[in-house]
Image (spheres, grey):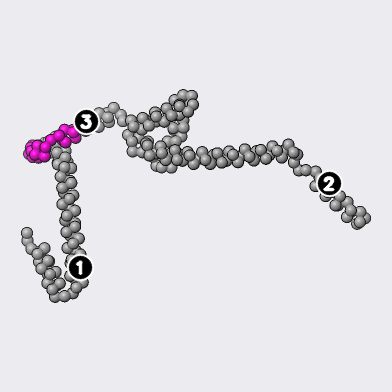
Amino acid sequence: MAQTSQAVAPAQSAVAAAIPLLSVVELETIEQLGRDYWVITETKEAADRKLAQCDVALFDLVDGRDYAAFMAVRQAYVTGCRDKGAASDEAAAKPWEAAIKRITASCGFVRPKAQTRTAKAMSEKRAAALAELAAKSESDLQTELDSAVAQGTAGALKKATALRAELDKRNKPALDAADAVRKALLDKIIARAKELAKAKTDDADALLDAAFDAMSADS
């Protein structure tokens, strides 16, 4: 019996090997599926890279713009989508909204808000007031400032604040330049004092004492 079993086992293995696991049609179908999946995967990866590049470009175009400019960018974007076959402005706006959501999440973009009629009027009024101040000479600004302070009313003091701000803005470059000169001089004094202290000689100590006395003297 043992010999019969040993003879049958190889024969059964040979029969199993002769039966293919997949038919020729199945093999061809599955191989084509593999090709299709690979092409789709490569195409999707390329599309994702291009999409990321487009998102960065869009962020650069809309970041920091006010609402009116933001909407102008949107309209140009929608026009581009229509040129490529979008059936309507509504259909073209869908990829725009999706892109804005992506750059909001990935780039921290903040969508600008539309100004209300009241806010727009206040902005225009402030711009007109600043333009009026900018047209005045410094002597006129100072004269009006002195007059407003002398009046002392709430309205006059509010005007004085605006006049003072305009004068400070004009004087800022000169004040900044003077501060830069002072800082440079201070740095030189500190560096020289360190050199004298490091020298530890009588002459160096005398110079330090003289400098201290000079800076301590009443002006």
Instruction: Tell me which segment is drawn in magenta.
Output: 128-151
Kindly indicate the quadrant of the structure image that contains residue 121. Answer: top left
Residue type (three-letter) at the residue carrying disc 3:
Lys
Can you give x and y, in whole percent of width and height, for residue 146 in the image? 8, 40
Q: Nearer the viewer, mark 1 or mark 3?
A: 1
Magenta: main secondary structure equals: helix
* Residue bearing mark 1: 194
Residue nearer the viewer, 77 or 97: 77
As rendered, which of 203 and 67 lies closer to the eye? 203
State the residue position of label 3: 125
Mark 2 and mark 1 lie on one chain; the one further toward the N terminus is 2
Whether residue 105 is visible to the viewer of this picture, yes or no, is: no
Residue 15 marker: 2
Where the C terminus falls, by quadrant?
A: bottom left
138 falls in the magenta region: yes
The earlier-in-sequence mark between 2 and 3 is 2
